[in-house]
């Protein structure tokens, strides 16, 4: 997972590894969790999908875009993976 976030917009790209390269993956669902009192990487790792501040699904280019974000720090985690792939359990800051 790689990407950038600037201002109030952020674009993140989900890729899968095949034998020769990384290819974009559509259909992965991600949750964005706003850091704050009681919200840490550890709590996000155990958090329910319903607790997400925002959710987005990667498109056919593997990209997700969160817009109209309030200023702050966020955690990102994959909630569901495309068919044939496993969920990446890492929580990104």
Image: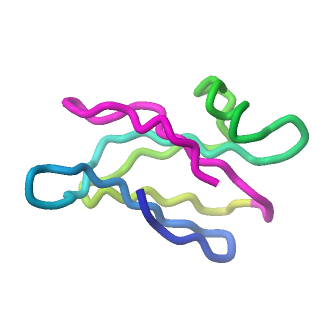
Q: Is residue 59 left or right of residue 6?
A: left
Picture residue at 49% right of the left edge, 60% below the top: 65
Q: Quadrant of residue 93?
A: bottom right
Numbered-mark total? 0
Q: Is residue 63 left or right of residue 40?
A: left
Q: Is residue 53 left or right of residue 11?
A: right
Quadrant including the N terminus: bottom left
Where does the image place residue 41, in percent across and percent down from the top left?
69, 41
- Depth check: give the residue in front, 48 or 59: 48
77 drawn magenta: yes
Picture residue at 56% right of the left edge, 40% below the top: 31
Where does the image place residue 35, in percent across and percent down from the top left?
78, 47
- Depth check: give the residue in front, 31 or 59: 31
Write down the region rendered in magenta: 70-93
Above or below residue 64? Residue 49 is above
Question: Magenta region's main secondary structure?
Answer: loop
62 drawn magenta: no
Where does the image place residue 72, in percent across and percent down from the top left?
79, 61
Picture residue at 40% right of the left edge, 31% below the top: 80
Residue furthest left as drawn: 20
Above or below residue 93? Residue 71 is below
Where does the image place residue 36, in percent across and percent down from the top left?
86, 46
Picture residue at 86% right of the left edge, 35% below the top: 38
Above or below residue 46? Residue 5 is below
């Amino acid at each position: 997972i790689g990407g950038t976030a600037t201002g109030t917009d952020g674009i993140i790209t989900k890729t899968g590894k095949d034998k020769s390269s990384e290819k974009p993956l559509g259909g992965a669902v991600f949750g964005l969790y706003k850091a704050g009192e009681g919200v840490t990487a550890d709590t996000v790792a155990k958090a329910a999908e319903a607790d997400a501040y925002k959710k987005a699904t990667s498109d056919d280019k593997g990209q997700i875009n969160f817009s109209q974000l309030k200023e702050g720090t966020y955690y990102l985690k994959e909630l569901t993976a495309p068919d044939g792939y496993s969920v990446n359990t890492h929580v990104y800051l």
